[in-house]
Image: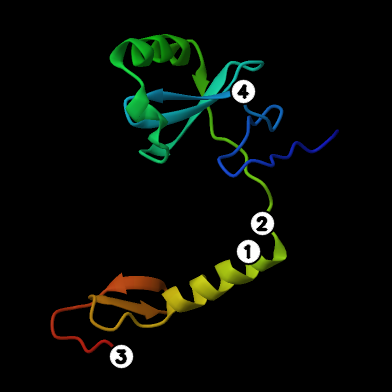
């Protein structure tokens, strides 16, 4: 059995790893795979293209999206540089947040108690 992979930043169809189109509904962006009739939401106001569309276009997009099943996309494997950056960010999150009401301990990040020092 061949492992399915995606190459696109915004993910790919879990069945084939590809996408067909990005449809806007107002400022929300949806990726689709026409072959497998699936869709996944990628965010809002990421691209300016929605500003050049009108309610008629969005109504047509809604009709298409209603015919597709919503899925969790698959994403590309991070590069070695990205893995290192993620590890560095994780290490930073584990440190004490000085002044924002969050402490890091053996059980993860938690809210500080009133009067608790940040260290």
Pointer 4 or 1: first along the chain: 4
Q: Is residue 25 above or below residue 10?
A: above
Q: Give me the C-alpha separation between circle 2 and circle 3.
A: 33 Å
- Residue 34 image position (x, y, % from top left): 61, 16
Q: Name which residue lies at 65% across and 31% down.
A: 14
Give the quarter of the figure containing the C terminus: bottom left
**Which residue does the numbered mark 2 point to in the structure image?**
78
Sequence-wise, which precedes: disc 2 or disc 4?
4
Mark 2 and mark 1: Cα distance apart in space: 6 Å
Q: Position of residue 85 (x, y in %)?
A: 58, 70
Label 2 environment density (alpha carbons within 10 Å; few <14, some 14–19, many ≥20): few
Q: Secondary structure at mark 4?
A: loop
**Placement of the N terminus among the 4 image quadrants:** top right
Residue assigned mark 3: 119
| Residue with the mark numbered 1 | 82
Q: Secondary structure at mark 2?
A: loop
Q: Which numbered mark, 3 or 1, is in the foreground of this view? A: 1
Residue 85 in view, yes or no: yes
In this rendering, the answer to whether 49 lies above or below 84 is above
Label number found at residue 20 = 4
Observer able to see residue 106:
no
Q: CA distance from mark 3 to mark 4?
A: 50 Å
Q: Crowding at label 1, few (<14), some or many (≥20) Cα neighbours within 10 Å?
A: few
Decide which of tag 2 and tag 3 comes sooner along the chain. Answer: 2
Q: Earlier in the sequence, mark 3 or mark 4?
A: 4
> Could you tell me how far apart the alpha carbons at marks 2 and 4 are, in whole angstroms?
22 Å
* Contact between labelled residues 1 and 2, with CB atoms less than 8 Å apart: yes
Q: CA distance from mark 3 to mark 1?
A: 29 Å
> In front of the other: label 2 or label 3?
2
Image-based side of 43 in relation to 102, left or right: right
Q: Residue furthest left?
A: 114
Q: Quadrant of residue 83?
A: bottom right
């Amino acid at each position: 059995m061949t492992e399915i992979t995606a190459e696109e930043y915004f993910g790919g169809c879990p069945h084939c790893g590809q996408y067909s189109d990005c449809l806007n509904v107002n400022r929300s962006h949806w990726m689709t795979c026409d072959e497998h009739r699936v869709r996944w939401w990628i965010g809002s106001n990421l691209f300016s293209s929605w500003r050049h569309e009108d309610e008629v276009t969005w109504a047509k997009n809604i009709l298409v999206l209603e015919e597709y099943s919503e899925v969790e996309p698959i994403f590309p494997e991070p590069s070695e540089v990205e893995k290192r950056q993620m590890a560095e960010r994780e290490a930073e999150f584990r440190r004490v947040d000085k002044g924002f009401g969050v402490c890091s301990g053996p059980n993860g990040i938690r809210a500080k108690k009133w009067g608790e020092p940040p260290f």
